[in-house]
Image (spheres, rainbow, N blue to C red):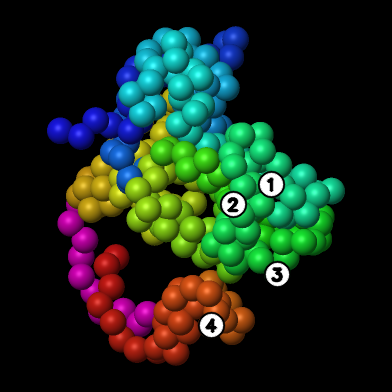
């Protein structure tokens, strides 16, 4: 059997009288996207901080790429990259200068070439020489994730990566996450957006009041509810469908799909209710 890229067993964490994590268990398979879904304050960021060695657990154990986060933190840090809730970019520098800086900090050869490759990969070549202060929210997030990929980490943590982004920027980030997994990178994604977990994740764990209350594929989680009743309803386009159909989304297939959905808004379709 393939060893888990991330293993969490009985993790507990409290901040004085506040019990944030109350015995969390889960595993993440290599090269998969694992979504940790929960409302604000559920403990998602606390788990990410423990797994990235920024915070020590009160009890339990965790390992990333086979390295214990408590006893082998340096090896864990060499295996991972972390993208937090807010883009950690230097606004005074240009996009390329941000990438070159991180490449030099990782003692990599040819930092300029690495920066150029990532700018091209994330569609930022034209903006590469501009100061990041002039970037949009979506561009900053793309640059932030690009910086996280320098050094080819085996595991990347994305802590609510689309918070505050507009619909087009969200779709861009979603495509980036999907591409990471296709390239063999293990992704642990925290989010409070149900549609984000549904679109991206191979497995979804629901964190509530410090505990994992459900963990499985989307199909497995759907089986937790009673069988759906089939009815014929008129499918209406969502506001997001309308927005994307009107403004377009040239670099993703989602824009085309949205346009088709909006055009077919008055068709009668089978739906689950």
Instruction: Please state the extent of the stretch shown in magenta in the rendering.
Output: 225-237
Q: Name the residue under label 1.
A: 100
* Residue at image coords 61%, 34%: 107
Element on which disc 3 rests: loop
Q: Mark 3 points at which residue?
A: 126
Element on which disc 4 rests: helix
* Dot placed on the residue nearer the N-terminal end, 1 or 3: 1
Q: Mark 2 points at which residue?
A: 114
Rendered view: 164 above or below 149: below
For residue 229, which quarter of the picture? Answer: bottom left
**Left or right of residue 269, residue 109 in this image:** right
- The number of numbered badges drawn on the structure is 4
Mark sitting on residue 245 = 4
Magenta segment's dominant SS is loop
Rendered view: 99 above or below 124: above
Res. 185 visible in picture: yes
């Amino acid at each position: 059997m393939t060893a888990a890229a991330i293993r969490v067993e009985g993790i507990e964490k409290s901040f004085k009288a506040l019990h944030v994590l109350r015995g969390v268990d889960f595993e993440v398979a290599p090269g998969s996207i694992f979504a940790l879904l929960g409302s604000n304050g559920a403990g998602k960021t606390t788990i990410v901080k423990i797994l990235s060695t920024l915070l020590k657990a009160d009890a339990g154990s965790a390992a990333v790429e086979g390295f214990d986060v408590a006893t082998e933190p340096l090896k864990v840090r060499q295996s991972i990259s972390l993208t937090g809730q807010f883009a950690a970019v230097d606004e005074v520098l240009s996009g390329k200068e941000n990438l070159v800086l991180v490449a030099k900090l990782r003692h990599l050869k040819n930092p300029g070439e690495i920066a150029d490759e990532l700018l091209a990969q994330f569609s930022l070549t034209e903006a590469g020489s501009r100061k990041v202060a002039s970037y949009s929210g979506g561009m900053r997030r793309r640059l932030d994730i690009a910086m996280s990929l320098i050094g080819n980490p085996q595991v990347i943590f994305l802590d609510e990566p689309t918070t505050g982004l507009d619909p087009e920027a969200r779709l861009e980030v979603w495509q980036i996450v999907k591409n990471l997994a296709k390239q063999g990178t293990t992704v642990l994604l925290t989010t409070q957006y149900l549609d984000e977990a549904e679109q991206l994740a191979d497995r979804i764990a629901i964190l509530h009041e410090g505990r994992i209350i459900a963990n499985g594929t989307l199909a497995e989680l759907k089986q937790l509810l009673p069988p759906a009743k089939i009815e014929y309803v008129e499918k209406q386009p969502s506001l997001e469908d309308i927005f994307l159909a009107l403004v377009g989304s040239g670099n993703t297939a989602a824009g085309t799909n949205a346009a088709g959905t909006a055009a077919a808004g008055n068709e009668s379709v089978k739906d689950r209710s």
